[in-house]
Image (cartoon, rainbow, N blue to C red):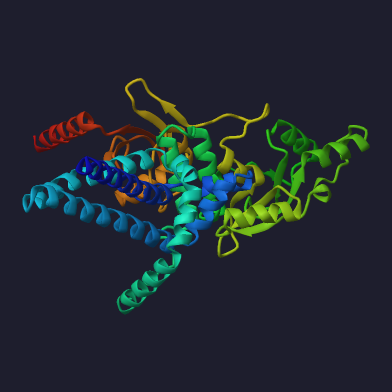
Amino acid sequence: METHIDLWFAASIVAISLLLSAFFAGAETAFTAASRARMHALEQAGDPRAAIVNRILAIRERFIGAMLIGYNIVAIGASAFTTSVLTALFGKSGVIYATVGMSVLVIVFAEVLPKTLAISKPDKAALLTARPVAFAVALMGPLAIAIEHVVRVMLKPFGVTIGEHQSILTAAEELRGQVALMHREGGVAKAERDMLGGLLDLSDLSVSDVMVHRTKMRAIDADQPSEDIVRAVLASPYTRMPLWRGTPENIVGVLHAKDLLRALDAAGGDASGLKVEALALETWFVPGTTSLRAQLKAFLTKKTHFALVVDEYGEVMGLVTLEDILEEIVGDIADEHDVTVSGVRPQGDGSVNVDGGVPIRDLNRAMDWDLPDEEATTIAGLVIHEARTIPDQGTAFNFHGFRFQVLRKAKNRITTLRITPLTAAGLQAAAHEQRHQGRDQGH
């Protein structure tokens, strides 16, 4: 009868030990994998458990030390107790039984099972175990602090400093990676991902990356008759128009359509007597290297939406507006007067016909591609950069996982390209075409 009671007592001790071991192992995994951002949001919303989690994660080394101490004390104690009981029952062979039995029980019930449950829902597991973990850390805190000090001393000669949580990535890169991961897992829509990514890119992009190039600028010759200027302003889809005199690069002011219409109304509708240049606003020139974040702040400070972009020699490169910067965040902004010229035309065979002047960033957003835009702004510029030459019409190149074929060319400008994503079948077809062209040239 006494032996029967001892076995039940031993089994109870082992079961309690396994439960405590599972608690320590699962809590360590849950707290390590829990989202700091989500815990911070829950704490701001008034969840006291989230506040405990954040407080514990602030002393991460002490928390890990306490969990490991608790786990090992319980696991070692259970193994030693089980070994002593089984040795008394089975003699020397009891050591083998204890080793095999406890190994299976610890691995399955005190390691794999609790950690699998914790990693599947780390935030919920961390909140559920917040108070018990806080008690365990407080209970074993002095011993954990002592062990933490020993570890610091041992790691110091190797140049490892505990407590310096320096991420390999910047904060913006971590946010970008988190958004991309959530998009891939279905938690964030593509439009939302693009908006967040555009917001994070403001510091990395300059106004020259988003400006309207001077070859596409709509400007008005200030020496024209005032009637012609009024007609040009009314025919334009834009509110602000640069005025030039002598050469298009010599900008003498910016004419606002509202100012012109007010002056026209005051003149009784007679445009012949208007002094248009006197109505023009002062021209604001900004360097092409200005970051979009700095330019956005400057637009808000000056309370104006229009600036001309100049290079290091003071020559006009193009123009940038507040709308151009906002479009980097929210995507294309169109109104009832905009002329929609996207320049991206998907084809039925999976290829895309693209105008050479289409910005790489706009094409990436439209097609969800990832073409590099570090060395070139437009898709034609990317092809020229990669080809190291200005290719002729009909020439094709394969790079960055795509096939680029020049469809049309005007003088030294690539006007239209066909871009085809290269799948495995596409690669084989491209290789076959290149071999065929090689044989034709050989004949």
Q: Is residue 145 left or right of residue 289?
A: left
Q: Quadrant of residue 395?
A: top left
Instruction: Name the one closer to the observer, 307 or 41.
Output: 41
Instruction: Name the one closer to the observer, 261 or 176.
Output: 176
Q: Quadrant of residue 7?
A: top left
Q: Is residue 220 left or right of residue 81?
A: right
> Residue sitting at 51 percent across and 31 percent down?
342
Q: Quadrant location of the N terminus?
A: top left
> Residue sitting at 35 percent across and 45 percent down?
383
- Residue 92: image x %, image y %? 6, 53
Query: Is 426 rendered above or below residue 242?
Result: above
- Residue 247: image x %, image y %? 64, 52
Query: Is 305 rendered above or below residue 346?
Result: below
- Residue 160: image x %, image y %? 35, 72
Query: Is residue 379 among the parts visible in the rendering?
Result: yes
Q: How many marks?
A: 0
Instruction: Name the one closer to the observer, 212 or 103.
Output: 103
- Residue 217: image x %, image y %? 61, 43
For this orientation, the residue located farthest to the top is 348
Q: Quadrant of residue 352?
A: top left
Instruction: Name the one closer to the observer, 374 or 392.
Output: 374
Query: Is residue 251 among the parts visible in the rendering?
Result: no
For this orientation, the residue located farthest to the bottom is 157
Q: Is residue 258 left or right of residue 396?
A: right
> Residue sitting at 8 percent across and 34 percent down?
443
Q: Is residue 308 left or right of residue 420?
A: right
